[in-house]
Image: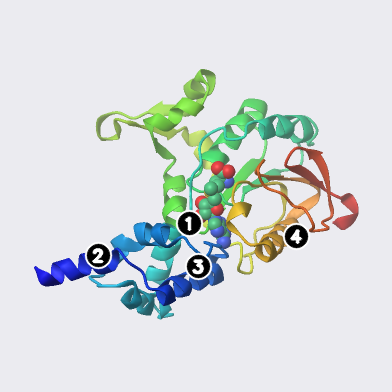
Amino acid sequence: MSSQLSSTINSDQISAEAYRWIRDYIHQEAGIDIGLSRQMLVIARLRKRLASCKLNSFDEYIHLLADPVNTFERQAAIDLLSTNETYFFRESQHLDVLREKVLKTHPRKQPLRLWSAASSSGEEAYTIAMVLSEHYGYSFDWKIFGSDVSERVVKQAQTGLYPLQRIDAISEEYRKLYCLKGIGKYNGYFLIDNRLRDRCRFEVVNLVKPLPDLGQFEVIFFRNALIYFDDETKELIIRALLAKLSAGGLLFIGHSESLKRMDLPLETIAPAAYRKLESEA
Ligand SMILES: C[S@@+](CC[C@H](N)C(=O)[O-])C[C@H]1O[C@@H](n2cnc3c(N)ncnc32)[C@H](O)[C@@H]1O
């Protein structure tokens, strides 16, 4: 009884040293800046790892994280400390910009590749896929690559299966075309149509580490992720993304985010939407 009591107490507290260590760790591993005083958030999100690993305190937990061989725990901490909120048709003004500036003008003989670069559980990528499918159908070569640092959300995106409440953000017309209501053990869920799933691929990509060979993209969506990074990391990531964006290609960020003071080879074409300058190919 007394040991149960002490373990409960210790997973409700975090020492200043353990907090600082975890803050530096998540910054180093994923670029995420959790700030100086989010102790309650760290406790709430990581408490279950202490219980699973049968540890009594965060001081013990950081020893697990510090072990470079323990990649499982590293991924578990990243999964829990990243904020993955997303929904279908988020900031849908950007979809009009996409229709106007890309879909109407892109020559059909050239493949069209789009990247949802912090895709979370895939809603952004599948939203874009619905818009592309409506415009082009499936006769022409368009593809969407979705990536995220969190393995947990990438796995969810790969399934294309979502709780039914999330369908509310999708129009009736698109629901009929692209969403299949689950039955039996999938009751309460819906599945994205397999023709869309075939056009979307999801992988774990950590944007603060050297990027794998992904090829070039005509459009990159990097929305509602910049807010989690400090200024230096923001610029590092944006420059890495721009290296993967074709000249004349479009970059979208979240409407509450900004690229101020970065001196980038971009022109603004709409709120939170930019075109990469041709001369910077
Ligand atoms: C709030 S979600 C945004 C999802 C979607 N883009 C949207 O606008 O709805 C932010 C995502 O950024 C991801 N993220 C954070 N750090 C990252 C990194 N270093 N590399 C790749 N993704 C990262 C998080 O895991 C999270 O899923």
Q: Quadrant of residue 239?
A: bottom right
Q: CA distance from mark 2 to mark 3?
A: 20 Å
Q: Amino acid at mark 3?
A: Ile
Residue 169: x and y in percent read: 50, 28
**For mark 1, does the 10 Å Cα neighbourhood hold few (<14), some (14 to 19), or many (20 or more) residues?**
many
Q: Amino acid at mark 4?
A: Ala
Q: CA distance from mark 1 to mark 3?
A: 9 Å
Q: Amino acid at mark 2?
A: Ala
In the image, taking residue 202 as reference, residue 9 lies left or right, namely left
State which mark lies toward you, 2 or 4: 2
Residue marked by disc 2: 51
Residue marked by disc 4: 243
Q: CA distance from mark 4 to mark 3?
A: 25 Å
Residue 206: x and y in percent read: 56, 63
Q: Tag 2, which secondary structure?
A: helix
In the image, taking residue 238 as reference, residue 57 lies left or right, namely left
Residue 217: x and y in percent read: 71, 50
Q: Which mark is residue 26?
A: 3
Quadrant holding the N terminus:
bottom left
Q: Tag 3, which secondary structure?
A: helix
Q: CA distance from mark 2 to mark 4?
A: 42 Å
Ligand 1 within 8 Å of disc 1? The answer is yes
**For mark 4, does the 10 Å Cα neighbourhood hold few (<14), some (14 to 19), or many (20 or more) residues?**
some
In the image, taking residue 89 as reference, residue 42 lies left or right, namely left
Q: Residue at x 78, y 34 (%)?
A: 101
In the image, taking residue 120 as reference, residue 141 lies left or right, namely right
For the residue pair 96 and 61, the one nearer the viewer reads as 61
Q: Residue at x 68, y 62 (%)?
A: 231
State which mark lies toward you, 4 or 1: 1
Q: Which mark is residue 82?
A: 1
